[in-house]
Image: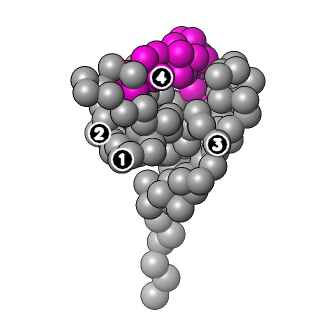
Amino acid sequence: MIIENWIGRLKEESPVFCGRVFGAAEFAVIGKTEAALTPRAYVVPLTEQAKDQPSVGKRYSDDITYTVGIVAVVKNVADATGEAAHKALKPVRLDIMQALCGWKDETMSYPVAYRSGRLLSFNNQLLHFGYIFSAHESLSLRVIPPKQATI
């Protein structure tokens, strides 16, 4: 999985961000850019999960599931019910879904699928909402036999 491909896909297919799509190795990085324009998004690799596949002969193969988070940042418009902030997320969510759901780059075995979303944080200025997606990659490697010990 190549994170730059995810970033490029969102930049190209999500006009709501006006190109403001970035990578982030960890959520702590996101908090250091609070003064930047909104809406914006961060692509964050979250997990890798491999199936327990035994090697067969001279080949090792496995299926790996990656989960990737897209952290959307919008202005937190204050109101009594939170409805204004929710409305601000609607076009962002739609752009993200249209760009990623069903998309498949050259490293993926199956198209990207949406898994879940949740509120990450909010304050007087910004709301951070995380969307979780999964992608799959098939791995096939040549098994290198151990070297024989010489005495």
| Snapshot quadrant of residue 76 | top left
- Which tag is nearer the camera, tag 1 or tag 2? 1
Cα separation between marks 1 and 2? 42 Å
Q: Which mark is residue 37?
A: 3
Q: Earlier in the sequence, mark 1 or mark 2?
A: 2
Please name the amino acid that badge 2 sits on: Asp
Secondary structure beneath disc 4? helix
Q: Is residue 111 visible?
A: no
- In primary-sequence order, the first of circles 1 and 3 is 3
Q: Is residue 101 magenta?
A: yes
Image quadrant holding the N terminus, namely: top right
Q: Which sits earlier in the primary sequence, circle 1 or circle 4?
A: 4
* The disc label shown at residue 44, or none: none
Q: Secondary structure at mark 3?
A: loop
Please name the residue that numbered disc 2 is placed on: 52
Sequence order check, earlier mark of 3 and 4: 3
Residue annotated with mark 1:
123
Label 4: few (<14), some or many (≥20) within 10 Å?
some
The image shows residue 107 at horizontal and vertical percentages of 62, 31
Q: Where does the magenta region start and end?
A: 85-110
Q: What residue does disc 4 label?
A: 88
Q: CA distance from mark 4 to mark 2?
A: 42 Å
Residue 2 horizontal side relative to residue 132, left or right: right
- In the image, what residue type sits under mark 1? Asn
Q: Nearer the viewer, residue 69 or 40?
A: 40
Q: Position of residue 65 (x, y in %)?
A: 40, 33
